[in-house]
Structures are given as C-alpha cells and as structure tokens.
Amino acid sequence: MNYRAFGRTGVQVSDLCLGCMNFGDDCSEADSIALMHRAIDDGINFFDTADVYSRGISETIVGKALAGEKRDKVFLATKVYNRMGDGPNDLGSHRYHIIKGCEDSLRRLNTDHIDLYQIHRPQSSIPIDETLRALDDLVRSGKVRYIGTSTFAAYQVVESLWASKELHLNRFVCEQPPYNLLDRRIERELLPMCRTYGIATIPWAPLAGGLLSGKYRAGAPRPDGARYASKAAPFARDNEAALQTVEKYVAWCDSRGYEPSQVALAWVLLQPGVTSPIIGPKNAAQYEAYLAARDLTLTADDHAALDALFPPGTHVSEYYRADFGPTARWM
C-alpha cells in the first residue's frame, strides 16, 4: 500500500480511503466487518463514515470492526450535519447539533476520539465562526483530532481559513468533494485552492455512482437493484445524456484492454492535489476491483484521450448539484 501526506498535517494515509456508506444497508454486518478487516490487512488505514449513513448503523458496525487493537491501525473519519431526528435542532452545522452529534458518534463508534470530524455539507445560514468554535472545543477536549469539510465551495473553505486565523481556532485540514471523469468542475477553483493552502482532498464518487463502471448502457434497461435502477433515484437526473459519452468511454477502454471502473478510479488517484479517493465496495468482488486499480498505469496518450471525452474543468453531466445560497438545498 502507498501512503500520502494528509495535507500539511504530517499524518500519513493510504492512497485509497475505505468508504463505509454501504455498510448496514447494501452490505450485511458480517460482510462489512470482513471487508474492513481485509482492508486493514491490505494496509488501508483510512476509513470514512458518517452519522447519517443508515441513521447510525454504519458507525455502529465500524465500531464493532475496530474493537480492540484494530482501532489504532485506522485514521477514522466521520461526519455531522444531516438530519438525525425529528426535532428542529436535529440537523445543521450549529454548536448544539455538532456537540450532540459528536457525542453520539463517539458512542456508536465505541471510541474515545474521532481522528477526522467533517461538516457534511455547508450551511450558509449558519455563521462559519459558530461552526468553527464548536469544532475547536471538540479538538481542545481531545474528542476530535482534526476537522474537515465535505462538498464545500472553494470560497467557503477560504472563508473558514480566514475565520480560523482571525479567531485563533483550529482550521479545516481537508475537503471531500465529488470528483470523477463525468464531473471535473472542482479543477477550476477547488483543487487549486486546496493545493495552495495545503488542504487534503478525499474525493467521493470516483465512479460517479457506477455510471463509469459500464453497467449502465445507453438505450438499455437499468440493472435491477442498482443505484440508478429508477430514473427518479437521487443523482439519476440528466444522466441519459451522459450515457452517450459513457458508451464511447467503454468502447475506448475495451480497445485498450482496460476495465472501465478501474480506469475511472486510477484516473482520480493520479490527479494533482488528490490525496485519497473514497471507494465504497458492497462486496468482496468490488473491493478487489478497486484495489487492482492502483496498479493500472495510464499513459500520456490515455490521459489525452480521456480529456477529449471528458473536457478538463467541465462536466459532461452534473453528478452533484448544490445551492450554496441562504436557502441551500442539496439533491
């Protein structure tokens, strides 16, 4: 396993991060624990989960998998922000929800500290100093080691760095954005900003939820049980147009003897400024395929061909849409 510096922190993390979103939902507890133990044996030391994944079930399973000595072998990340109850304060990036969310996550994870605590989405209606002061208290108390963001705009991260400096608070050390061949928008501002300020980048959806795996084909029925089996499923909007480009992509991969899913992951792994792409296996076969992508070498001609299909800094299809204004809604 290769290891990379986690931004400017000095922490070394594996070049793949094991995403735990499917654990407890599309992957049974026993299979999830087996996958985590296999990942540790293979040298993956970076796990990412969130309180909202299966409403806490993922964190509970992760806690069981890391019981005992295995806990110290993993740089453990989780997130807070999304709704975890029916009350008016059971979501958001304000102190009340952050502190309660951290205590709940610590209990589910069966640990005395969280290595990386991330704000799952931006909330422009909450002043960033309100969020940072709560997170700073958690760091100073020893319950959290580092803090980060997920799916923030570049200007929001920079605003937070300014606030941290002005108020002498712990700063965000990483950002977790959506990034894949179909959606390269973060190359315009976010990735350059992260490189400038020494912020680690841990992209999610490197396969665009499976769109780049080749299992969805233009004009063909969508596979039963797959993420995009229904056109009404989250993130499925406007992807029919993307499938036309995916057809060309799959044909190109076939001509090179490449597996489409492995190319998609290897490409993200090789992009400047990327620390650890997040993989989200549902089973051992998917995990093996993700691991094999690390050994794939893409040539300069390969990169040029991919840039022709998926132009840099643009998007063939928006994988993720966000409204960063006062009435923010995420889809």
Image (cartoon, rainbow, N blue to C red):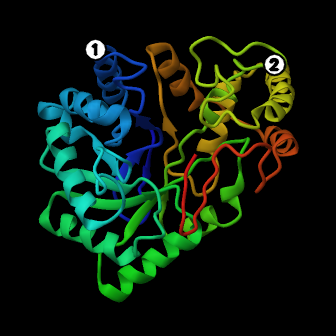
Report how many numbered discs are placed on residues in the image: 2
Describe the element under mark 1 as helix, strand or loop.
helix
Please state which of the two labelled residues, at mark 1 or mark 2, is closer to the viewer. Answer: 1
- Is 267 left, or right, of 44 in this rendering? right
User: Can see residue 14?
Assistant: yes
Q: In this view, does 257 lie above or below 277?
A: above
| Residue nearest the viewer, comparing 216 with 16 | 216
- Image quadrant where one finds the C terminus: top right
For image coordinates 27% across by 59% down, the residue present is: 98
Q: Residue 30 carries which label?
A: 1
For image coordinates 75% across by 13% down, the residue present is: 221
For image coordinates 52% across by 55% down, the residue present is: 151
| Residue nearest the viewer, comparing 290 with 230 | 230
Question: Counting residues from the N terminus, which is met first, the one under dot 1 or under dot 2?
Answer: 1
| Residue nearest the viewer, comparing 219 with 254 | 219
Describe the element under mark 2 as helix, strand or loop.
helix
Which residue in the protein does label 2 denote?
Answer: 254
